Image: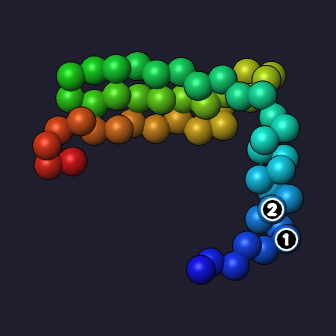
Amino acid sequence: MKKVSIADTKQRRNLSEQKLTIGLELGDRSSYYCVLEEGGQVVLEQRVPLTRFA
């Protein structure tokens, strides 16, 4: 069993209090997602391959 540190718990609490918006772009070979904060700043943006070998 993994021990959860106090710092990790505080970080999770802060994330749960934030309001985030997630956008998806779906494609045939890959999809993209983007996570935005309330102010519109990009938190995370990533491509997800959808091929069999990916």
Residue 6 versus residue 44: which sits nearer the camera? 6
Distance (Cα) linking label 2 and label 1: 5 Å
- Rendered location of residue 20, percent (x, y): 71, 28
> Horizontal placement of 54 versus 13: left or right?
left
Q: Name the residue type under label 2.
A: Thr
Residue at image mark 1: 6
- Rendered location of residue 50, percent (x, y): 24, 36
Q: Is residue 40 above or below residue 51?
A: above
- What residue sits 79% from the left and 23% below the top? 38
> Horizontal placement of 14 versus 44: left or right?
right
Which class describes the residues within 10 Å of circle 1: few (<14), some (14-19), or many (20+)?
A: few
Residues under numbered marks 2 and 1 in contact, where contact means CB atoms less than 8 Å apart: yes
- What residue sits 14% from the left and 43% below the top? 52
> Horizontal placement of 27 versus 44: left or right?
left
Residue projecting furthest to the front: 1
Q: Name the residue type under label 1.
A: Ile
Can you see residue 11? yes
- What residue sits 80% from the left and 56% below the top? 11
- What residue sits 41% from the left and 29% below the top? 32
Residue at image mark 2: 9
Which class describes the residues within 10 Å of circle 2: few (<14), some (14-19), or many (20+)?
A: few
Q: Is residue 9 above or below residue 44?
A: below
